[in-house]
Image (spheres, rainbow, N blue to C red):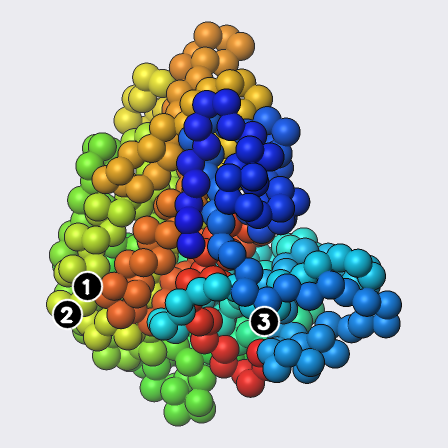
Amino acid sequence: MIIHVVLPGETIYSISEYYRTPADRLILENGIINPDNLAIGQTIVIVEPEILYTVKAGDTLVGIAEQYGVSPMELLRNNPYLSDRELMYPGETIVIKYQTNKTVTIATSGYTFAYIDKSVLIKTLPFLSYLTIFNYRATLEGEIIASDDESELIRLAKAYGVAPMLFVSTITEAGVISREVTYEIINNPSVLDRLIDNIFQTVKTKGYYGINVYAENINYDNINAIVENIRKTYEVFHSEGYRVVVTITPITNIDTYDGSFEKIDYSKLAEYADAIIFTSYDWARTYSYPNSIFPVNVVRELLDYGVSIIPSQKIFLGITTQGYDWTLPYVPGATGATVISNNDAVKFAADNNIPIQFNEAAQSPYFYYMDNNRVLHQVWFKDARSFDARTKLAAEYNLQGVSLWTIMRFDAQLWFIINTQYYIERLLGID
């Protein structure tokens, strides 16, 4: 795999000629939305196909897969644009296999809301081990409330061999944690028992593979109480064969450029979970310091600590899949940021002739711009180098896998890198 960083004066056609790879394939594989006007500093991933096939009249995906001894899911991973349509066209070329040196298998988990565009979901499912549906919130009484009906998502996940996971938290509709509800669950056994029973009945009725519990605001004072809650949950669900995952947001200082995290003994939680996801919701707060979300140098420090107290194969590394646009100067607690997709960040830089810079320590791209009101902005986002660096950490530390927040948009470069560099664990016998 080669990650090409666009230089001044380069075009998609000059890059295509240099690497002897068709321009239309570079555009498809990288999901490039600005092919006629590349941004300086934009990344393009090049992986040479090993086997190509030219579609003939009457061909089907299943028939081609059988002819080459591969699975239909592998063909969809190699050609994700095929998920957008019902037919293949005679004369078009599809990739049967890439020239890769895959040796490591990782699990992939993607968070989604129930209102995800179904075409995005269908394109993403072949790349997933788990689909975590962010849909349920707990109440003071131990009830759980769903935002939308997720039945279709569960059905589609299983049809594609992906394990659907119910996610439950005390995050309100406004997107903030309810400390009152969290306190009640932690400290009131009857509320916890009612909550566990309600979740269990929902998992069983809806057909989930297991649950993903967001352990919120863990600190030195409440860790033992949270562990006891997770233990009770684990015993109920594991006895019935359901998987239990715990999502943790390490307490971080996000009002400084470098960032830091508290070294709490998460090993106690790991005893009662099949997996621990270290994720980065706090870093994605709109009022945090302008910086890469969960920079690689901080992630490495966290993983060094994590694997020293938790078996590495129980850990998922959380990866954010979106960027943020801050106004400057930054005022702690007052300066807000808006979410921007990685593709939109690149296109904005290209349209405004802004060179994209890259922070090596954080392994993240960024740029500055001035808006129409003469207000300075800083944009941080992810590119191929960012995704490559973070997925390599999963392999280096022998983690169970990576967890993506979120899959509401399809990021072609992310999945292109994962698909061509790693085997993806599949749990339900469909691949």
**Pick the front one: 375 or 126:** 126
- Which of disc 3 and disc 1 is earlier in sequence? 3
Foreground disc of the pair 2, 3: 3
**Pick the front one: 422 or 316:** 422
At 57% across and 22% down in the image, what residue appears? Answer: 351
**In this picture, residue 264 sits left or right of residue 379:** left
Task: Give the spatial CA distance, label 1 vs label 3.
Answer: 33 Å
**Residue wearing tag 3:** 74
At 44% across and 71% down in the image, what residue appears? Answer: 423
Asked if the residue under mark 1 is in contact with the one under mark 2, i.e. CB atoms within 8 Å, the reply is yes
What is the secondary structure assignment of the residue under circle 2? helix
What is the secondary structure assignment of the residue under circle 1? helix
**384 up-or-down from 215: above or below:** above
Residue 75: quadrant of the picture: bottom right
Disc 3 residue type (three-letter) = Glu
Task: Give the spatial CA distance, label 2 vs label 3.
Answer: 36 Å
What is the secondary structure assignment of the residue under circle 3? helix
**Residue wearing tag 1:** 306
In percent of width and height, residue 274 lies at 34, 78
In percent of width and height, residue 82 lies at 71, 60
At 61% across and 72% down in the image, what residue appears? Answer: 73
| Mark 3 neighbour class, 10 Å CA radius: few under 14, some 14 to 19, many 20 or more | some
Disc 2 residue type (three-letter) = Ile
**If the image is split into quadrants, where does the N terminus sit?**
bottom left
**Residue wearing tag 2:** 309
